[in-house]
Amino acid sequence: MKTYLLAALAALALAAPVHATAPTTVASTAAPSGYAVVPASFTFVACDASNGNSFVNTGRQVLIAFNSDASAHSITVASVADSAGRTGDSTKNINAGAYYVFQFFPLNGWNQTDGTIHTTCSDATLKLAVITFP
């Protein structure tokens, strides 16, 4: 029984990403509100494939990922245990030249203890942008 428990704990430890430093922050751009004449302008930032990325989440953010490479790459948004103890990271494989827009992230089940969401990318050619809606 101890062998199975140790093997399960070892597998769990290997599944959690370990970063040398804190994740790189992705700044959020405010979406236009009401009847804005000028659209929101945002800049993509490269994924930090070594340390991951993070952004502040109030429940009104969407994450846009763009693959600027000629090969497919993946991005994972790390979940945390919700009020019922459930987890479920969201991993998306993004084809070359394609975009993926993640829906709003509820606070429960996604926010880390510091109020941010953490992402990991398989390659720095994935670009990220965060838009905050009013």
Image: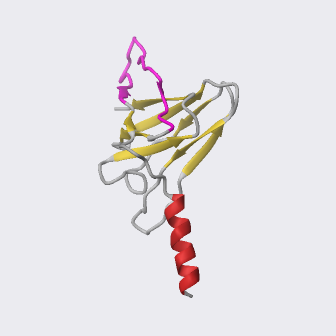
Q: How many marks?
A: 0
Q: In percent of the image, x 41 and y 18: which residue is there?
A: 40
- Vertical placement of 51 versus 107: above or below? above
Residue extending farthest top? 37
- Vertical placement of 73 versus 76: above or below? above
Q: Indicate left or right for 113 with 15 as reference.
A: left
How is this picture coloured? secondary structure
Query: Please, what is the dominant secondary structure of the magenta stretch?
Result: loop
Residue extending farthest bottom? 1
Q: Nearer the viewer, residue 84 or 112?
A: 112
Q: Give how far across and how far down residue 130 sits, in percent.
A: 43, 31
Q: Give how far across and how far down residue 33 sits, in percent.
A: 35, 24
Q: Indicate left or right for 37 with 5 as reference.
A: left
Q: In percent of the image, x 39 and y 56: which residue is there?
A: 108
Q: Quadrant of the N terminus?
A: bottom right
Which portion, as a residue range, is magenta? Answer: 27-49
Q: Quadrant of the C terminus?
A: top left
Q: Nearer the viewer, residue 5 or 102?
A: 5
Q: Give how far across and how far down residue 13 sits, in percent.
A: 49, 64
- Residue 30, quarter of picture: top left
Q: Nearer the viewer, residue 57 or 133?
A: 57
- Residue 85, quarter of picture: bottom left
Q: In percent of the image, x 66 and y 24: which residue is there?
A: 97
12 part of magenta stretch: no
29 part of magenta stretch: yes
Q: Give how far across and how far down residue 123 sits, in percent.
A: 58, 34
Residue extending farthest left? 114
